[in-house]
Amino acid sequence: MNYLFFVFVLLACFSVENLSAQAGTPDSTFADQGIYDEVSQAGSIVSIMPKQNGEIICFTREDPTGFSVVNFTSNGIFYFDRGIYIPQYQDPPWGVEDVIEIPGGNYLGAGTYNHMGSIFKFLPIGSVDTSFGDDGHIDFTFTSELEEIVVQKNDNILGLITDNNFTLFRLQPPNYQLDSTFGTNGLMPINLPSGSSPSYKITTQRNGKILYGASLGKKAMIYRYTPNGAIDNNFGTSGVSEIEIPAQVTNARVIILEQKAGKILALTKYQDTTILFRLNDDASLDSTFGINGFVSLYDSSKYVVQSSDMQVQADGKILVLGKFIQPNRPDNWLGVQRLNANGKKDSTFGDNSVAEVVFYNEITPKDIILLPDGKILLSAESNLGSPIFWEYLVMVRFLSGLNLGILDFTEDISAPYIYPNPIQSSSTLSFFLQHPETLSIDLFNLQGQKVKSFVNQKYFTPGEHKVDLSFDDISTTGYYLLRINNGKQLVGIRVLKR
C-alpha cells in the first residue's frame, strides 16, 4: 500500500469497540483499513458516486487516450470483471467533464464531442448506451464544453456551459433537448464581469432556485436564479450578492451549498487561505455564523491548502475536503475538517475537527461523498511521479459518528435514516426513539401539498423501528419532503422519487 496510516487516538486508551465508533477515524471495514489506493491507469477522476445498492462507481478520464469506468463493492473491493475502457477519445475527439445518476440506474455525462457541447448516456455498469442519440451521445450547436450537471425536480437536467459568458442550460428528458421554458430558448447567460474567476459548480436550493458563485478581486459574487432561469431580483442587487472577503485573497475559487432552508453556505479558496461565509435568504451575511458571518480554516499549526469540495451532513455539520499542511512534515496529507452548523470547530471529530491520512506520494483532493449510512467517503488522485506517471485512484472512508437513526424531537440534529434514496418504488424509514411518541408520517411536494399519508397518529414505543414506504402510486418523479410529526414538532427528510 502507498499510504502511511495515522490516527490521532492513543490505542492504549481505547478499546477496539470505542475506536471503531470514534468519529473521524478511518472505517476499517472499507478496503485496506479504510483506504483504497491501487496503481491503475484510470487517469483523473471525473465523477465518483454510490449506487442505490451501496456499490461505488467511478468515471475517469485518460488524457488523451480514452475514458474508463471502475466498479467497487460497498466496502471498496474492486470488481475485476467490471472494468470498462472506452477508447473513443481521438477520432473524433470527445471528453466527459461530469457524470450524474438518472432514473433507472443509468448515468448521464456532460462534455464535448467533435468540439461540440454534448451529453452522453451510460448504462448501470458504466458502458455507453449506444441506443441513446447518435451512438450514445447528443450534440448541441454551441462549441463550448458542457461542465457541471445536476438533476432538477421532474428530472430536468440543469447544467453549465463554459463559454465566455458562462451560461446555464436546461434539458428535458427523455429526449434531453433544450427546454424552451428555461431562460431564453433553454439558455441563461450569467455574464460574468471581465477578469472574474469563475466556478465550475452550480447548486439548487430546496425551493428549486439556482445558485452560482464567482469572484472578482476580493469580492465573492453569488448569483441566484428562479427555477426557470430568470434573475431572482429578490436576492441581493438584481440577483447578485457581492461579499468582500476579510482576507488577502484575489479571484478566489467559490463553492456554494444550501446548508438548510434559507441559509446559503459559500467556501472561498485562494492559495493557502480558505474562508467560509453564510448568507441569509435575502443575501445578507448571517451574523450567527462564525464571526460576523465568516469562518477562516487557518490556524497557527495546520490549515487547508487545497480545499476542493464541501458537503453538509444531515445534522447540518459542515465538511471541507483538502490537503492539510503542518510545519515540519510532508504536504501529502489528505483529510477532512468538520465544523458544527454554526461554523465552530467540531472537537468530537478526528483531532480537534480534522481527520486525515498521509500518503507517500503527491495527493490531489477531488470530492467528498456522503454515503447513505452517514459515513464520509473522500476521493483523490495520486501518482508515482516521473517517469511512470500512472495515476492512483484514492478513496478514504471515515466514520462520521452520525447516527442517522436517532429521532429526538427535543433536539435539532435528528436525522432519521431512509434507504434507498433516491427511491424507485419503495424505501424503508429507520429510526430509534428515546421516548414514546405518537407519530404521523406524510409525504409533501415542494409546493407544500400533501400527496400521501404513510402513518396516521400511530403510537411508537421507545426503541428501534422500521417503516416500509411504498412509492408505487407516486407517478411524478422529483423531490418530495417526508415529514414526521408528533403533533407539536416536525422532522423533515428530502427524498427523490425516480
Image (cartoon, rainbow, N blue to C red):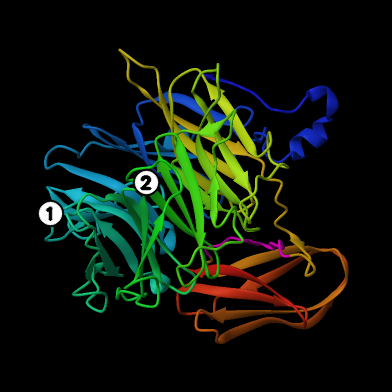
Could one spot residue 83 in this view of the protein? Answer: yes
Q: Is residue 418 magenta?
A: yes
Nearer-the-camera pick, 226 or 441: 226
Query: Along the line of sight, which residue is nearer the eye, 479 or 337?
Result: 337
Tell me where the magenta segment starts and ends, as one range.
Answer: 412-422
Of 401 and 346, nearer the camera is 346
Secondary structure character of the magenta stretch overall: loop
Per the image, the residue denoted by label 1 is 143
Give the labeled residue for mark 2: 253
**Frontmost residue, 265 versus 4:** 265
Residue type, mark 1 in image: Thr
- Which quadrant, please, contains the N terminus? top right
**Disc 2 on helix, strand or loop?**
strand
Counting residues from the N terminus, which is met first, the one under dot 1 or under dot 2? Answer: 1
Q: Hey, which quadrant is residue 235 in on the image?
A: bottom left
Q: x, y (%) of residue 160?
A: 28, 58
User: At label 2, which amino acid type do we have?
Assistant: Arg
Q: Residue at x 34, y 34 (%)?
A: 44
